[in-house]
Each structure stands twice: as structure tokens, then as C-alpha cells.
Amino acid sequence: MKFPKLRRTQWLGLAAVIVFGGRLAFMLTEKKDPDVLPSGVRISDLPKPPDMPMPDLNPVPAKPLEVGSQEARDMLYCSGVISAENKAKPNAPMEESLPRMTAAIALANAGRRKLEAEGAVQGFGAIAVDTAWGEKAAADYTAGKPAIALSDCMKKADALPPPPPDPNAPKPEDLTLKGSQAARDDLYCAGVISAEFDHKDQHSDEMSKQIGAMRALDEAGLAKLRAESVATEMSGAGFSLAFIAKANADYEAGKLRIPFAECMKRSSTVPPAPN
């Protein structure tokens, strides 16, 4: 068998392929030491960084009862006094225990917010201060010597401003924008008649007509929303209340989208509400 005669450049190319191909095969089959970097430096020989403890972003104060302003301390102490009163009277009627529970929670939240606003503590640190004052207030209450009387603590809770809105809280859904226009008009008219009923003294016969019209429109609107898979039997009340609130606000502003007289006429075009 005769091999073709190769030119000089072809011989050089063939030699390069053989050399580099062999080297590539050697590199692929060569066992590499995982401790050695491509530069030849061993990873184990590199200097290790010093062990640095993670900083505590919310440190708990060593003396929690000495942290923050007197106003913040009094809020947290009063929260503890009110909580102790509720704990001491577990069988108290709900109309007594619920206002106390609400007041205790409001004071605790206000006290922690004030501590954080003052820069005294944050997060778990504020909770630790709250807990410490709660324990002290409970001990003073049990001993019959609270530093702030229960009645004064309840007054302090009543004087609290409303809590600031949570910027991360989801915005409530506007139910008056959902569903077909026909369904929304029925429910809006039901709200308009409700507003008229609430704002004007009526003869008993007229009141009876308005109640019937309001119920018929409300039921007709909800039936449409259910047929459109927008509302369910369980969620219907939420739609009714949303439209009543919307229509009442428009009524008081003198800007009704559908006048009262037209809503009364509309009520005659829908089926009567079931008894």
C-alpha cells in the first residue's frame, strides 16, 4: 500500500495534531490533586482567615429594666399589670376580659415601638425588655403593690394613638370593581336605597317599599356574581357590605352614580328577594 506524498506544511500539521492530541488525552486521563490550584499552589498552604463571630444584630440588654425612656417603660409595665389582672380573673365575663386583653396588647406593642424608635433596642432586644417588665409587673401585682394602678394603666391604653399602618400589609381588595356592570349596578342601587333609608325619616309604607327594593336588588346582584363565578354563598356578604359603604359615601358627598329614584325603578325589574 502506497501512502500519498505529503507536502512539508502537511507534515507539520500532522505532527502538530499528533503532539497536541496526545497531550490533550494525557490531560484528560491524568488524575488531578484537588488540593492543587492551576497555579501549582496548594489550597491547604494558603493562610486561613481568622474565625470571626457573627455580630448579634438584636442584642439582648444585660439590664432590660434600665433600657429606654420612662414613657416606654410605663407602657410595658402597664401592659404587664393589665395582663396580671386578666390572669388573676380567668372566669371574668368576656365584656370585661376582652377590653383588658386588647389594652395590654396595645400597650406592649406601643412600648416596643417606642424603644425601637429611641434606638434603645431592636427586635429580640425589645421583646426581652417587654418580657422583663411583664414579669416585674406580675410580681408587683401578686404582692399587691403595683407601681401604677390598674385603672391608670387602662387610661394610659385609652390615650394611645392608633398604631401606624403597616407599609407591607396587602391592600384590601375593592370588591365594588369586580363582576359585570349589571351585577355592580344592582348592588350599588341596593346601597343607595340603604343610604336613603338611613338618612331620611320615612312613612312606614315607604320604609317597607325601600326594604323590599333593597333586598331584591342585593339578591339579584349577588345571584349574578355567583353565576359569573365572582362570588360564592360565603363571600356574598362581603360584596353587599362593600357596595353599601361605597353608596353611603357617595350619598353623603352628593355624588351618587345612580340616583335614588332610578334605583327604585331598577328594583321593579329584578325578581323579588326570597322570604
Image (cartoon, rainbow, N blue to C red):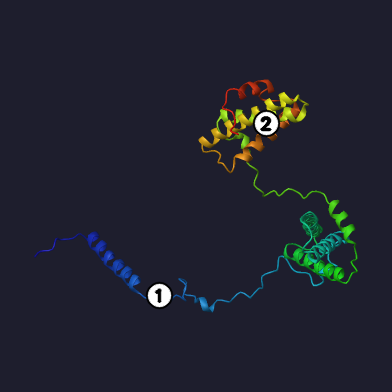
Which residue, given by chain and number where applicable, does mark 2 sit on? 191
Whether 247 is drawn above or below 97: the answer is above
Q: At which x and y percent is residue 22? A: 29, 70
Residue at which label 1 appears: 32
Say what amino acid the circle numbered 2 marks. Gly
| Numbered mark located on residue 238 in the image | none
Give the distance between the C-alpha atoms of the residues marked 2 and 1, in whole angstroms.
Answer: 80 Å
Quarter of the image that includes the N terminus:
bottom left
Is residue 89 or residue 55 the one in the foreground? 89
Alpha-carbon neighbours of circle 2 within 10 Å: few (<14), some, or many (≥20)?
many
- SS class of the residue under badge 2? helix
Is 255 displayed left or right of 233 in the figure?
A: right
Q: Label 1, secondary structure: give it.
A: loop
Q: Is residue 192 visible?
A: no
Q: Give the image location of residue 36, x and y in percent.
A: 46, 75
Q: Is residue 96 visible?
A: yes
The quarter holding residue 60 reads bottom right
- Residue type highlighted by circle 1: Lys
Residue 5 to residue 182: above or below: below
Q: Residue at x 66, y 70 (%)?
A: 54
247 vs 97, left or right, is: left
Q: Quadrant of residue 198?
A: top right
Q: 6 or 45: which is nearer to us?
A: 45
Residue at image x 86%, y 68%? 141
- The quadrant holding residue 143 is bottom right
Foreground of the two, 226 or 130 = 226
